[in-house]
Image: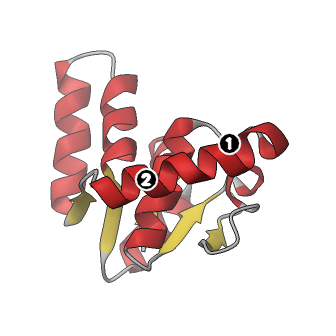
Amino acid sequence: MIFDTDIFIWVQRKNERAADLIDKSIQRYLSIQSYMELLQCANNKSQHKYIKDFLNEYDFIVLPFTENIGHRASIYIEEYTLSSNLRAGDAIIAASAVEHNMILVSSNAKHFKPIKELQLKIFKP
């Protein structure tokens, strides 16, 4: 399962359902895009360390940005930006999930629902 950035934000906000979802997952993945978004939102080095330690403790695997992911994400932007306001970061996260044939968990249904081949699990906080 690939976790969208928002799931980590819910965990940081002490949402028990989000924490349980991560805790009960056998394999945990995130896109390099989510990894960068998490680090970008940190205010200092200790928050960077906290994020890295959390991901290591729960054995998250960061999926790299590949040529296929980039190509698929660009197609999603062409197809869905005008109709659904899909942004580049979300396109990369969705493309990562589709390329690896994994379920994406997100509470952001609006951003991802139009992508037909995406296996999406909606998280409701």
| Viewer can see residue 102 | yes
Question: What residue lies at 39% left-to-right and 79% top-to-bottom?
Answer: 25
| Residue 86: numbered disc | 1
**Horizontal relation, residue 34 to residue 104: left or right:** left
**Residue closest to the eye, 59 or 104:** 104
- Name the residue at the bottom extreme: 26
**Horizontal relation, residue 45 to residue 100: left or right:** left
**Residue closest to the eye, 11 or 55:** 55
Relative height, residue 12 to residue 49 (above, below): below
Q: Position of residue 22 (x, y in %)?
A: 41, 68
Question: What residue lies at 65% left-to-right and 44% top-to-bottom?
Answer: 78
Q: Position of residue 114 (x, y in %)?
A: 76, 61
What amino acid is at disc 2?
His
Q: Earlier in the sequence, mark 2 or mark 1?
A: 2
Crowding at dot 2, Cα within 10 Å, few <14 / some 14-19 / many 20+, comes out as: few
Q: Position of residue 87 (x, y in %)?
A: 61, 37
